[in-house]
Amino acid sequence: MALFAVNTGLRDSNVCGLRWSWEVSIPELKRSVFVIPRQLFKSRRAHVVILNDAAWSIVESQRGKHSEWVFSYRGDCVGTMNNTAWQRARREANLPGVRVHDLRHTFATRLRAAGTHEEDRAALLGHARRTMPELYASADVGRLVALANRVLDRVGTRTILRVANG
């Protein structure tokens, strides 16, 4: 789930509550996206979750494990990623200050480092748009997949870890 979050920029509640019924096939890309209903997304607008190659492979590995939830535990959806498994992983990695939400920040930071324009980052992260051109010019899914895949090319890059509260 953490790897999925760091490759989609989704918030904890959206990763945990991701449903198979929200999956929409994009035949020309031989891939799919997920459309999170507006009432379940922070900006109160439906959000199209673009899957880069890493996120797509995670979805494929989850297929067939549960009929309703993409990520499940003991037959139900996972309530939160900030659970004992997350706490143990942080402790073992000696990263006690890293929060689940930092996965979203990491995706955004990697998009920016890869040269992805602000408008495209906003589309990938589901930020509310403010300008009229952005309102009328919707993004191409294939292009967004290519941009999301840029975060997977880590040659010559450095990871910046943001430490909150000291």
Image: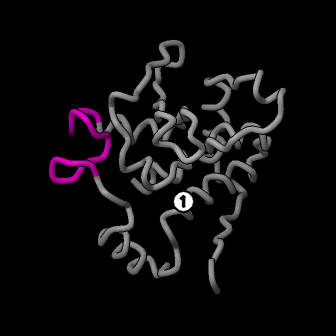
Amino acid type of the residue that numbered disc 1 sits on in the rendered structure: Leu
Q: Which residues are magenta?
A: 63-77
Q: Total of numbered circles in the picture?
A: 1
Measured as percent of width and height from the top left, residue 119 is found at 77, 38
* Quadrant (top left/top right/bottom left/bottom right) for the C terminus: bottom right
Residue drawn 53% across the image and 19% down it: 29
Residue drawn 29% across the image and 54% down it: 78
Magenta includes 82?
no
Measured as percent of width and height from the top left, residue 106 is found at 61, 59
- Which element type, helix, strand or loop, lies under badge 1? helix
Task: Check the image and report above or below for 97 versus 53.
Answer: below
Most distant residue in the left direction: 74
Residue drawn 66% across the image and 65% down it: 159
Q: Is residue 9 left or right of residue 150?
A: left
Mark 1 = which residue? 103
Q: Nearer the viewer, residue 146 or 101?
A: 101
Residue drawn 42% across the image and 52% down it: 13
- Magenta region's main secondary structure? loop
Measured as percent of width and height from the top left, residue 138 is found at 71, 23
Q: Is residue 45 left or right of residue 120?
A: left
Q: Is residue 158 visible?
A: yes
Q: Is residue 61 left or right of residue 6?
A: left
Q: Nearer the viewer, residue 69 or 3?
A: 69
Task: Check the image and report above or below for 117 versus 9.
Answer: above
Instruction: Count neighbours of disc 1 (C-alpha within 10 A) and say few if under 14, some if 14 to 19, many if 20 or more.
Output: many
Q: Is residue 50 visible?
A: no
Q: Nearer the viewer, residue 129 or 59?
A: 129
